[in-house]
Image (cartoon, rainbow, N blue to C red):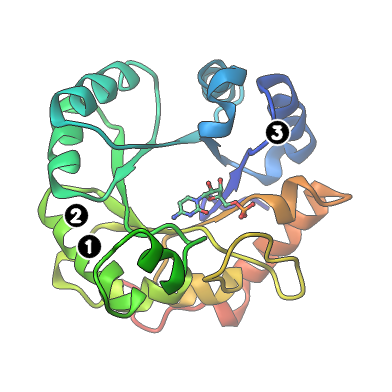
Amino acid sequence: MSDDRLIVALDVPDALTGLQMAERLGDTVTFYKIGLGMLTGGGLALANELKQDHGKRIFLDMKLFDIGATVEAAVRGLAQFDLDFLTVHGDPNVIRAAREGAAGKDMQILAVTILTSLDRDDLDAAMIVPGDIPDIVTARAARAFEAGADGIVCSPNEAALVRTLPQAEGRLIVTPGVRPAGSDAGDQKRIATPASAIAAGADHVVVGRPIHRAPDPRAAAEAILAELQSPQAQRANRV
Ligand code: C5P
């Protein structure tokens, strides 16, 4: 059984460890996220190998944020690789620049709304406008879609609200901050189970530590895939 709604975050130190983890997971997992932590550890080479030799889909989580010209140049460079998803921060000018950089390529641009590891106290410390996180995430998502994002990244707790946006029609919602019941939250603060994230409107769930740190990663991934097939993962208004 495999299901590309599950994206496994390969947050391991280097490409060799990532490849070994992907080999342990085998056919169970079809979609991998490679993030900043592996940038200096051969992350792009691993992305290429998983794509070309193993036929996996690749989400490169770079969370780019810079002036437009620099974002455009970075995205243009990354678009030479055969990537499926790339993240940028969800500021409209950043998204517009990323769209330019990805022009003519299939790579989809995902906008990060507010990191799932942040709560209201963290936003206060960063001087982000007052208000409830779901409202701020939803407003940022609407602007991101208007600026041309193919999808957004948010916590499962906000997915249902984002799904109600007219601008979200036909766009992707990808949710990290996903924890099978009973597993350690780690530094994540706005979390939900895989099934409830999908039921709330997520198209993909990103799961890292509950799989790659499990004693048996393949069994952990299979348990999540089984949960995604359960009635609890049904989305009432699924189109
Ligand atoms: O180990 P865990 O399941 O918490 O991993 C979640 C992954 O999703 C990490 O790679 C993290 O960088 C990423 N992520 C996140 N929150 C976002 C965007 C990405 O946790 N808003």
Across and down, in percent, residue 24 comes to 79, 36
Q: Tell me the mark number nearer the camera, choosing from 3 and 2.
A: 2
Q: Is mark 2 within 8 Å of ligand 1?
A: no
Q: Is mark 1 within 8 Å of ligand 1?
A: no
Please tell me how crowded label 2 is: few (under 14), some (14-19), or many (20+) other residues with Cα within 10 Å: many
The CA distance from mark 3 to mark 2 is: 32 Å
The CA distance from mark 3 to mark 1 is: 34 Å
Q: Which mark is residue 5?
A: none
Residue 164 visible in the snapshot: yes
Across and down, in percent, residue 15 comes to 66, 21
Q: Tell me the mark number nearer the camera, choosing from 3 and 1.
A: 1
- Residue drawn at (75%, 68%) of the image: 183
Disc 3, disc 1: CB below 8 Å? no
Q: Which residue is mark 2?
A: 144
Across and down, in percent, residue 3 comes to 57, 53
Report the front residue among 186 and 149: 186
In the depicted structure, whether residue 204 falls above or below residue 101: below
- Give the amino acid type for the residue marked by disc 1 in the picture: Arg
Q: Is residue 100 left or right of residue 220?
A: left
Q: Which SS class for mark 1?
A: helix
Report the front residue among 26 and 197: 197
Q: Which residue is mark 1?
A: 140
- Residue drawn at (24%, 33%) of the image: 66
- Residue drawn at (68%, 53%) of the image: 1
Q: Which SS class for mark 2?
A: helix
- Give the amino acid type for the residue marked by disc 2 in the picture: Ala
Please tell me how crowded label 1 is: few (under 14), some (14-19), or many (20+) other residues with Cα within 10 Å: many
| Nearest to N terminus: mark 3 or mark 2 | 3
Q: Which mark is residue 22?
A: 3
Q: Is residue 190 left or right of residue 102?
A: right
Please tell me how crowded label 3 is: few (under 14), some (14-19), or many (20+) other residues with Cα within 10 Å: many
